[in-house]
Image: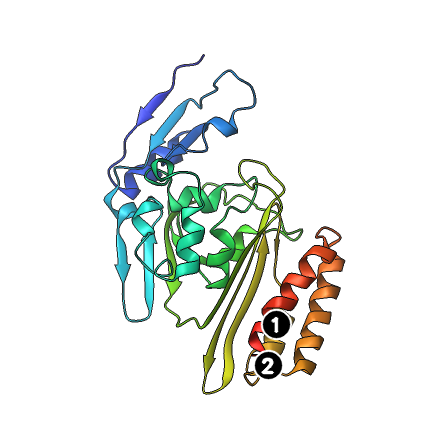
């Protein structure tokens, strides 16, 4: 077993300095996925390890009238009573993740950046148009969460950038649908979550998102646009049209089980017709 140099940076600039000078470095937040990333039963460590849990900025939660932002090192337990987990369905989804002991140390940043699949909260935050703030040695930039998805729908790494914060617009959500499909997702199962959110304003749908994510992530932007601005209750004609659009786009991926997923999307559209 090789010996590693362990660093405990106190600020993000200090962390970025360590990253810039090391070729082989591993960042650790809650370390809840560490064991699953080992290729063999013998533990293998990078030459340098940086523990990010002592950086105050990565633990802060800020809220304005229009947005809430979490530091990437906030634990899942720390998010239990903030938006969007104030809603019953997202709160239930959060509680399905491992045990309370694991949620006390697992971080939202590690949850989103786990690159073997899209974990439980990813499709929910994708539906909310979450933005990710990355820091690098010479700059910082903000990317939509879909920045982590490649052209084949798979999770792609963010290089040497450090995820610092997750920003979420504060929306009033009237319809929430969350359904787990298949078996387990973590650490490498074939399960997935189907999440749909809708907001209604003056008898019309002013916001609609539907995301399916597990081993891959899926979203049909055109189908969402077809629903947005439609009257509520949704007309059967529009619902049929949208369901057909999802049928076509899912089949084009040549990955998802349309016989399983389309009836679930049909249920979501039926709820909007009531």
Q: x and y percent of residue 3 in the render?
A: 39, 15
**Residue that numbered label 1 is attached to:** 269
Q: Residue 6, can we see it?
A: yes
Q: Residue 55 falls in which quadrant of the image?
A: top left
Instruction: State left or right for residue 190 relative to residue 171.
Output: right
Q: Residue at x 39, y 32 (%)?
A: 31
Q: Which residue is mark 2?
A: 234
Q: Give above or below for 46 relative to 205.
A: above
Provide residue 141's location: percent of width, then percent of height: 41, 56
Q: Would you say the residues marked 1 and 2 are in contact, meaning their CB atoms lie under 8 Å apart?
A: yes
Provide the secondary structure element on which disc 1 rests.
helix
Question: Considering depth in this image, is 156 or 67 the residue closer to the camera?
Answer: 67
Vertical side of 68 occupied by 201: above or below: below
Q: Is residue 8 left or right of residue 29?
A: left
Q: Is there any visible trace of residue 144 in the rendered image? A: no
**Nearer to the camera, 73 or 179:** 179
Query: In this picture, is 247 found above or below 270?
Result: above
User: Which quarter of the figure is the N terminus placed in?
Assistant: top left
Question: From mark 1 to mark 2, how far is it between C-alphas?
Answer: 8 Å
Instruction: Return the disc, 1 or 2, that comes first in the chain's sequence.
Output: 2
Q: Quadrant of residue 56?
A: top left
Mark 2 is surrounded, within 10 Å at the Cα level, by few (under 14), some (14 to 19) or many (20 or more) other residues, namely some
Give the residue displayed 49% in from the left and 86% down from the top: 203
For mark 2, give the secondary structure: loop
Q: Residue at x 34, y 36 (%)?
A: 101
Which residue occupies the foreground of this view, 195 or 260?
Answer: 260
Residue extending farthest to the top is: 1
Q: Residue furthest front?
A: 274
The structure residue drawn at horizontal position 72% and vertical position 53%, both measured from the top left corner, is 257
Residue 73 position within the rendered picture, expressed as x and y whole percent measured from the top left: 33, 43
Answer few, some or many: residues within 10 Å of disc 1's Cα (few below 14, many 20 plus, some between 14 and 19). Answer: many
């Amino acid at each position: 077993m090789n010996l590693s140099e362990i660093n405990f940076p106190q600020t993000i600039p200090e962390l970025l300095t360590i990253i810039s000078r090391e070729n082989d470095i591993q960042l650790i937040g809650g370390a809840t996925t560490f064991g699953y990333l080992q290729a063999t039963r013998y533990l293998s460590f990078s030459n340098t390890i940086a523990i990010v849990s002592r950086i105050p900025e990565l633990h802060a939660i800020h809220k304005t009238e229009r947005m809430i932002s979490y530091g990437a090192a906030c634990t899942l337990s720390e998010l239990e009573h903030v938006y969007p987990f104030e809603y019953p369905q997202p709160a239930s989804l959060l509680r399905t993740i491992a045990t309370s002991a694991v949620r006390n140390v697992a971080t939202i940043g590690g949850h989103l950046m786990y690159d073997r699949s899209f974990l439980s909260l990813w499709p929910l935050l994708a539906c909310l148009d979450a933005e990710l703030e990355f820091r690098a040695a010479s700059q910082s930039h903000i990317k939509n969460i879909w920045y982590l998805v490649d052209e084949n729908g798979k999770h792609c790494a963010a290089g040497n950038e450090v995820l610092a914060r997750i920003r979420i617009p504060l929306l009033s959500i009237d319809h929430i649908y969350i359904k787990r499909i298949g078996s387990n997702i973590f650490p490498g199962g074939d399960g997935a979550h189907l999440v749909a959110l809708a907001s209604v304003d003056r008898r019309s749908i002013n916001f609609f998102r539907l995301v399916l994510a597990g081993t891959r992530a899926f979203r049909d932007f055109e189908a969402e646009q077809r629903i947005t601005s439609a009257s509520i209750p949704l007309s059967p004609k529009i619902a049929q049209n949208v369901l057909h659009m999802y049928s076509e786009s899912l089949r084009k991926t040549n990955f998802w089980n349309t016989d399983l997923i389309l009836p679930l999307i049909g249920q979501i559209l039926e709820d909007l017709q009531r």
